[in-house]
Amino acid sequence: MKTVTLTDAHCIEIGETERPEPSSDELLVEINICGICTTDLHMYSGNLSVDYPMVPGHESAGEVASVGEDVDDFQTGDRVAINPSIPCHECRACKSGRENLCYDLTSIGGAAKHIIDGAFSEYVTVPVGNVERIGDLDYRTASFAEPLGCVINGIDQIDLTSGETVVVVGGGFIGQLLVQTLRVSGAGTIVLSEPVAERREIGLKVGADHAVDPTDEDPEAAISDLVGEVDVAIEAVGLPETIEQAHALTGPGGRTLVFGVPPEDATVEISPFDLFFEEREVVGSYSLTPNTFARAVTLLQNDRIDVNTLVTDEFGLGGLETAFEQMESREGLKKVVYPNQ
C-alpha cells in the first residue's frame, strides 16, 4: 500500500509498505480521504516535537476492509469516520470522562504521548471503539468529524450561554468551524477577527455577524463599537500576541479560550489581579473525546455544518508538500488528501 512518511523536518517519502492486519479488537479501514491539519504542518515543519520517521494524518474516513476475530459489531463494507485519539480508559482523566487528557494517550497520526501510523496511507488499523458509523454521509463531510469534535470540546470548555457575544480571533479553517459551531450552539452575536479578506467573507457566509480586519483598525475598539461588551473570546491562531489580544477583548466575567496551538516555549502576559478582581477566565482546549466525536458525526449527518465552502484544495498523496507550502503562505482554507488517487 502507498504510505507517506515524514523522515525529518521538511522531508517526505512516499513508498510502498505492507498492508497491516487488524488485531483481534481492531478494524482495518481503507482510507478514502484524510484532511490536512495544522498539526500535520507543525510536524512537517519541525515546530512540533515528534519522533521521525512517522506517518501523519488523523482526520479520516473510509470503508472497513477487514475485522479482527473478536469484532462483532462491524463488518466488511461498513462506512466509518475515525477518531484518532486512543485513551487508556484506566487513568483518572479517562475515568472522569476527559479522555483527551489521558495520561497515556495514543494518537493515530496526531499529537499525543504515543503516535502510531496515521491515515496518510491507503489503509490503517483502528481499535473498534474508535470509529463511528456514518451511513450514507459522504466521506469528505465525514472527515470533518475529528476537527469538529475538537471544536465541540473547546466550546464545552467555555460554558456558552445562549445569546452571548463571542469573538473568534483567526479565520482559518478551525476559526470557520468555530464560527459555525458557535452558531448552532446558541451564540448571540459572533464576530470574526481576520486579516485576510477572503476569509472574512467566508466567515460572514457561514455564520459570523461581523468581520473585522485587525491590521486595518484596532480590533478592541472596532469590536467594542460594533457589539459592546464581549462575553467570550476564542483564539484560533496559536500566537502569544493573538492570545493576549483575545484576552483583552473581554471584560469582567469574560472567558478566553486558547484553541490555537502555540509554540511549546511561548509565554503570555496576563494580569492575575484582573483574573481575581474581575472574575475573568482563561481556559485551554486540547483534542477531543469519544463523546464530542460522536456529537460531531451527528451534526454532520444532520447538515448543521457547511463543509463544501471550507474545502478549497484536494490532492493525492503526492501533493502533500504543495499543500503544506500553501498552508504556510495562508493560501485557501481546508485541504484534503485522497490516498487512493
Image: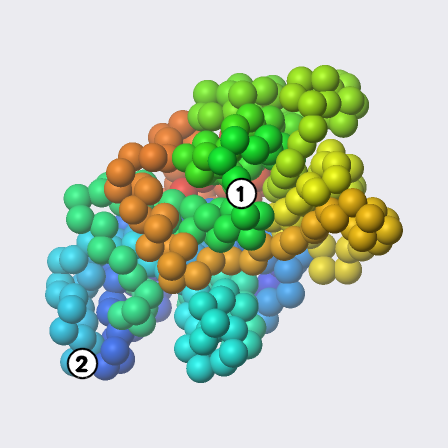
Q: Residue 62 carries which label?
A: none
Residue 266 appears in the figure: yes
Q: Nearer the viewer, mark 2 or mark 1?
A: 1
The residue tagged 2 is 70
The residue tagged 1 is 160
Q: What amino acid is at disc 1?
A: Leu
Residue 287 locus on image (x, y percent): 51, 58
Nearer-N-terminus badge (2/1): 2
Dot 2 alpha-carbon crowd within 10 angstroms: few under 14, some 14 to 19, many 20 or more: few
135 left or right of 195 in image = left
In the rendered image of this protein, does residue 153 appear above or below residue 217?
A: below
265 left or right of 30 in image = right
Q: Determine the secondary structure under disc 1.
A: loop
Q: What amino acid is at disc 2?
A: Asp
In the rendered image of this protein, does residue 24 appear above or below residue 255?
A: below
Q: How far apart are marks 2 and 1 (CA)?
A: 41 Å
Residue 226 picture quarter: top right
Residue 234 locus on image (x, y percent): 62, 41
Residue 134 locus on image (x, y percent): 23, 50
Residue 57 locus on image (x, y percent): 44, 56
Observer-nearest residue: 168 or 22?
168
Q: In which quarter of the image is the N terminus?
A: bottom left
Residue 154 appears in the figure: no
Observer-nearest residue: 182 or 45?
182
Q: Residue at x 56, y 33 (%)?
A: 164
Dot 1 alpha-carbon crowd within 10 angstroms: few under 14, some 14 to 19, many 20 or more: some
Residue 23 picture quarter: bottom left
Q: Which residue is drawn at 26% across and 38% down?
A: 302
Q: Determine the secondary structure under disc 2.
A: loop
Q: Which residue is drawn at 47% across and 58% down?
A: 288
Q: Which residue is drawn at 49% across and 67% down?
A: 98
